[in-house]
């Protein structure tokens, strides 16, 4: 007697709608990332006025660098921990860690303990961003890598606006410590949702030998089933092999250029996120206006990411990133002059349009350089090495502030913009140089441009 076989369920189309749960959960995680990063800059003027804490401009810059140093360690170690825990649990651990760091800051009675809290927060923050970027690039619909990256990163700026709102309202009314207590919310809100709703990466599941689970997740969300070449390398040996692949002939020159562009971009992002309110206050603007500039620049960042993602999908992420870096440099030089308040708000907003998306398009450009199997390692190292810029930025502006030269910070930002533009501009030429000695170009999986 013959048995009838049930045909497999039809695969859903690979669109934004089918992968919306993943994009939405990663968006929420990065929202809280942006809120935590920007909280320090939003309340720093109030903390400097708190004589009981003992914070000075010099130590404020050092603490900002401790935060980003923690982020550097978190970014570079997240990949190895992902081999054991998977991306889903690593995201949960990252959110829990920076929430715990925020709680430690809220109870800190001196600068040393507060700095330790920011370092702990940095460990969680550093691992979260590359994990979320890798997740959304894996789940992104075809030919929409840059747009998806831009949409994800809008959440960072909404988080920054939320932090600024807390700095403008909660800090004056209840004190700066309550702003850091608000930073515990991610553990209460995002962690349960991530545990319940976020799927594991099909590529990671395949790399861990869980082929059936990998295929089930891919089929559920309409993704192509991962192949061995698309799976990230597992284990310490696999990680070392993945790093060596970043310097194969086709990408050996482009890799350090991406690192340099990311260094410049993150110096800008974290230098400005940490010091903009205090720099504007030192330029003669009032306390509320100075904090409000952080809100305005993040609002500009949201607009810029929505523009940059669409433009880059059409004209290329490399080209857009270079132009955006140059416009950021111009905006930084304009902010060095003391303009009327209304004009200053406009310049800050427009600079935000270019500033943040210039760095995000560096991430999108990695899809033009690395193969599927190299994407996670390439993106992790671009973000990880770039974190050195995030360490240098807050420290350097803190040193300038301690000597009464805050205005030179704007010149520093302009030079970083020029450096980022030059580095990313040279990536296509570097790829052509690398391919000169090979028989075929590296395959590209996303139309992020070159």
Image (tube, grey):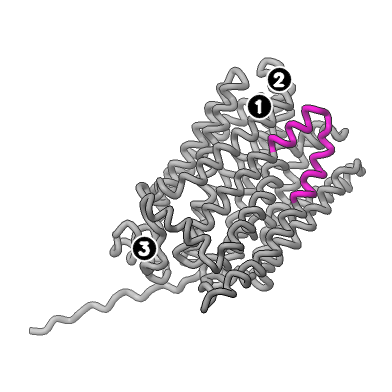
Measure the alpha-carbon separation of dots 2 and 1: 9 Å
Q: Is residue 151 visible?
A: no
> Residue at point 57% right, 44% down?
33
Q: Determine whether label 1 and label 3 are within 8 Å by CB.
A: no
- Residue with the mark numbered 1: 176
Q: Residue furthest top?
A: 52
Whichever of labels 2 and 1 marks the residue nearer the N terminus, that label is: 2
Residue 414 screen position, x and y as percent: 80, 49
Which residue is labeled 3 in the image? 217
Which quadrant of the structure image shows residue 397? top right
The residue closer to the viewer here, 444 or 245, is 245
| In the rendered image, the vertical position of residue 290 relative to residue 366, given as above or below | above
* Residue with the mark numbered 2: 50
Give the quadrant of the C terminus.
bottom right
Image quadrant containing the N terminus: bottom left
Alpha carbons under labels 1 and 3: distance apart: 44 Å
The residue positioned 67% from the left and 65% from the top of the image is 318
Residue 44 is inside the magenta segment: no
Which residue corresponds to the image point at 52% horizontal and 40% vertical from the top-left?
73
Q: Which of pointers 2 and 1 indicates the residue nearer the eye?
A: 2
Magenta-highlighted residues: 394-416
Q: Compute the Cα span from label 3 to label 2.
A: 51 Å
Lateral position of residue 288 relative to residue 196, left or right: right
Q: Residue at x 68, y 56 (%)?
A: 357
Q: Residue furthest front?
A: 437
């Amino acid at each position: 007697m013959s048995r009838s076989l049930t045909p497999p369920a039809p695969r859903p189309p690979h669109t934004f709608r089918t992968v919306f749960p993943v994009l939405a959960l990663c968006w929420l995680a990065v929202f809280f990332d942006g809120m935590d990063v920007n909280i320090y800059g939003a309340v720093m003027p109030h903390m400097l006025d708190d004589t009981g804490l003992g914070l000075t401009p010099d130590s404020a810059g050092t603490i900002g660098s401790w935060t980003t140093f923690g982020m550097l360690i978190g970014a570079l170690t997240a990949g190895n921990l992902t081999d054991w825990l998977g991306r889903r649990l690593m995201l949960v651990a990252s959110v829990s860690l920076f929430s715990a760091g925020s709680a430690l800051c809220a109870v800190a009675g001196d600068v040393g303990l507060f700095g330790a809290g920011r370092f702990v927060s940095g460990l969680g923050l550093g691992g979260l961003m590359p994990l979320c970027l890798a997740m959304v690039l894996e789940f992104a619909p075809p030919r929409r890598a840059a747009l998806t990256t831009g949409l994800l990163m809008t959440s960072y700026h909404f988080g920054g606006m939320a932090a600024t709102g807390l700095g403008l309202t909660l800090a004056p009314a209840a004190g700066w410590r309550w702003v850091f207590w608000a930073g515990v919310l991610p553990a209460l809100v995002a962690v349960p949702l991530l545990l319940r709703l976020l799927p594991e990466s099909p590529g990671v599941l395949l790399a861990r030998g869980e082929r059936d689970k990998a295929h089930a997740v891919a089929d559920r969300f309409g993704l192509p089933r991962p192949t061995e070449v698309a799976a990230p390398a597992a284990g310490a040996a696999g990680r070392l092999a993945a790093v060596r692949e970043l310097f194969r002939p086709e990408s050996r020159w482009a890799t350090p250029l991406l690192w340099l562009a990311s260094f410049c971009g993150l110096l800008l992002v974290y230098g400005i996120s940490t010091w903009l309110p205090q720099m504007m206050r030192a330029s003669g603007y009032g306390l509320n206006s100075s904090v409000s500039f952080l809100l305005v620049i993040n609002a500009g960042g949201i607009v810029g990411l929505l523009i940059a993602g669409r433009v880059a999908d059409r004209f290329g992420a490399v080209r857009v990133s270079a132009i955006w870096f140059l416009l950021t440099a111009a905006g930084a030089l304009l902010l060095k002059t003391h303009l009327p308040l209304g004009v200053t708000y406009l310049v800050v907003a427009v600079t935000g349009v270019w500033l943040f998306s210039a760095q995000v398009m560096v991430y999108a450009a990695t899809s033009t350089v690395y193969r599927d199997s190299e994407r996670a390692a390439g993106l992790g190292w671009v973000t990880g090495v770039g974190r050195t810029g995030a360490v240098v930025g807050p420290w350097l502006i803190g040193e300038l502030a301690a000597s009464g030269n805050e205005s030179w910070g704007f010149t520093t930002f302009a030079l970083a913009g020029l450096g980022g533009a030059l580095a990313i501009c040279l990536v296509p030429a570097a790829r052509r140089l690398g391919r000169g000695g090979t028989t075929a170009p590296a395959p590209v999986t996303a139309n992020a441009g070159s």
